[in-house]
Image (cartoon, helix red, strand yellow):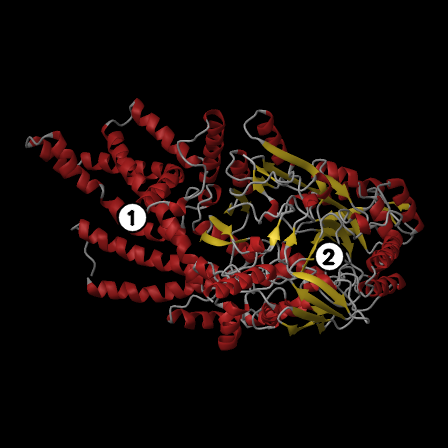
Amino acid sequence: MRNAIRLVIGLSVLLTAGALAQVFTWPAKWTTAKPGEAKPGGTLVDYTISDFRTMNPFITAEADSIPDRMTMNDSGLVIRDPTTGEWIPYMATSWEVSEDQTEITFKIRKGMKWSDGKPITADDWIMTYRIHMDPDVGSNSRDSFFIGDKPVTVEKIDDYTIKFVYPKPDAEAFAIASFSPWPAHVFGPVYEEKGAEGIKAMWGLNEDPKNIVTWGPFVVESYRPGERVIFKKNPYFGEWNQDEAGNPLPYLDRYQVNIYKDINAALAAFLTGEVDIFGPSTVEHIAQIKKAVKEGKLDATLKVNASPVASSQFVVFNWNKAKDPFKEKLFRSAKFRKAMSHLINRQAVVDVVYGGLGTPMYGSVYPVLTQWINKDAPKYPYDPEKAAQLLAELGFKKKDKEGYLVDAEGRRLEFNLSTNAGNNQREQIAKLFVDEAKKVGVKINFRPIDFNTLVGQLLAKGPDRPFDAIIIGLTGGGLDWPFGSNVVPCKGNLHLWNRSGTCLDPRETLMEALYYKGRTTLDFKERVQIGYKLQEVEGDLQPIVYIAGPNYHVAWNNKLAGFHPDEIISSIWGAYELPLLFQAK
Amino acid sequence: MSAYLVRRLIHLVPTFLGATFLAFFVLQIAPGDFLTQWALDPKIRPETIERMRHNFGLDRPLLLQYLIWLKNLLHGDLGVSFMYQRPVLEVVWPRIENSLILVGLSILFLYLIGIPIGIYQALRPYTLPDYVISFFAYFGLAIPNFFFMLILIFLFVKFKFAFGWTPFPIGGMTSQGFEQLAPWRQWVDILWHAILPAFVVVTADLSGLTRVMRAQVMEVLGQDYIRTARAKGLAERVVLYKHALRNAVIPILANIGGLLPGLIGGAGLVEVVANWPGITPLLLDALLQQDLYVNVGIIALSSLLLIVGNILGDLLLAVVDPRIRYG
């Protein structure tokens, strides 16, 4: 009898173990490590430039945060395969898309546990969504749950099934569903009892790390203000994350992030081996690392020009100048803007401003998004003669005494240009532009101004806005549909050239229509074709004259291994998958 | 004396109000606010920014914002940091503690080095050692602290490359593995990290202190009572330390009150360069991000300490110098 009971217990243990077996296997092609090469143990030391502000995922607003570091940059039900860019199931095991493409039902992976050992279920996603959506909490993620003005809703079907309902079909449906869950058993009771204020008071920087719970590979172990945060391995992560050989992940025991206010301090720490990974951003950084490696002082791998970064620098001309019809007519002319594009020596910008480590740009799609770039879209590269010719067609044929172009009525071709003071790169770009323009007889008065004043001018609304031309940049822009939801549509608040609230040029109207068409097209290939068309119209309209962007570089200390193969090292995929890194020496 | 004290404390109120209102006003007339940084973020909708501006109270009239802040101050509440979403004191205090260590150590260095050097120079004025010391003291005054720190870091990195170790750590406040150390070892570790930046901070103040000390001792040594002391046959050591020095240090003692705001003001850009997590890096962040209440909070705390420090200095002066009476 006793034996029988033992047998039953034994069987049930086996069965439970069987239930745990919904494992996510990390593909070997995501790393350069040979199978079986990786050993457990060791520490990765990374750095960040500005101190962390909170451990609370619902109020974090920085680009680099503790919650993001714990959850592999806010990963969740689905992640992207860096080798293909496609969405693959991660904390989900599968999904179903409804026929009208407005509902996606995810099956949640079974056997996942929080770092405190409690099971991860649909309730966690529902609670996370509810808290993000509460306007009083002020979560930065709230806006990501809206398509236009309508919210996406999330429903629980059962403990391991969850349904996302979209107001209309959307190219970014998976991106919207990919957010990281947070433990309902930790946040839920506080939220029910004290509401938004209760949530906001949780998980500050002085929170006892014992109370921090995550699903991710590492959980906070200690934090010292302004110095470092140390994460330790979450033992439950390895139960459902394994390599192809079946070893639990992550390999590393600890993950440390040092805080350096000054980039030179971070570089010094990398050169002396205190920090394992460094993101060089200037030629000077690269030269110092190369020198240290060459002289045998540092055993490191350096990848220069791995890819362009996902950001852009551009000139925008103001179409809303009711009080100055001469300039308004000029800035609204595509011919004028094409002439300006011909006056921008992008190669010189790359050479002078980025020390040769940059990429010229001709359109709104970042060069790193190679799948999306339409190589046949119209381009207006550096060519002062063509610029002069286009300006002559606009009536600027003669030059005045000072050598500047004037039209038939003697009005000089002159405008003001500004950018945010203190941004050396943009100031250099502006000076190159001013010099080239002067050569063909265009007078540009360049004056950098304070960033907040600049933003105020750019975002001013109505028929008369207080600037002529501004050099600025934007970041962001997804892999699913790389056009900005508030940039392309004419009512968008980042429709920087025209903030009158209506489309003024038929090509603007066409771009807006193509934007919405692409956004609601779920078939990837079809969507890329719409994107191509959009880039053609954009090229012809030149609403914004794109200039160039810097490249992405990365260096790491060779005591660590398991980084991405060269093909997938980029500003989008980074240099590694955290769970796959291991200590080699 | 107590009437004087009460009068000084009453004066404190308008000074404090004036200083904080000016700070509040100047910080707010800068274009934009904390939320402007997100205005160009394609992922954030403009209505979200407006809602947050309302939640933060930044859409209210300036005077009203100030009065609300004052009212909360009476309850010991300095407001909430926009960046951290936490009470200002909670954000600022750990950083002030860190700065205290650095500034405290450098003040200790300053007096330990500065006073003996000043006396030494006063006893041998216009000689070669006097000139050499003055030269180095002025050199320390002339070179900006942050730059001096950068040069030291550069030299120590070179040293590390050459020998594989450094006598002092290159930046930071604690070593790797700090959390696992015993408490007394933790203190040793912090002091070991603080020595280099504290030394750099001292170099800037050393010339001032040694000059004052040198002039004071020289002046006192010329006084009649010193001649009297010597004339009655006292040993030179007794003349110097018992009679001269006590009188010479009076202005330096009176100055101690002035150090109080400096204690929480931090060591300036040295903290940034040496990666010392003091108040300066936080203040810089707060200024750049226009985190209003952190800025005003730090200004309020240091102006309060400045005023209290001045009163203390005056009182101290009366204690050490019987010639001074307040009525």
Q: Residue at x 25, y 30 (%)?
A: B120
Q: Is residue B32 visible?
A: no
**Residues under numbered marks 1 and 2 in contact, where contact means CB atoms less than 8 Å apart:** no
User: Residue A355: x, y in percent?
Assistant: 69, 36
Determine the chain carrying the residue at label 2. Answer: A
Task: In this rendered view, identify the residue nearer to me: B36 or A146.
Answer: A146
Q: Residue at x 31, y 39 (%)?
A: B109
Residue lying at the far front in this picture: please name it.
Answer: A1
Q: Amino acid at mark 2?
A: Trp
Residue drawn at the location 40% of the way across and 49% of the way down: B266
Of discs 1 and 2, which sits in the foreground?
2
Toward the bottom, the furthest residue is A193
- Quadrant where the image shows the C terminus of chain B: bottom left
Quick check: A536 left or right of B224? right
Q: Which label belongs to residue B255?
A: 1
Amino acid at circle 1: Asn
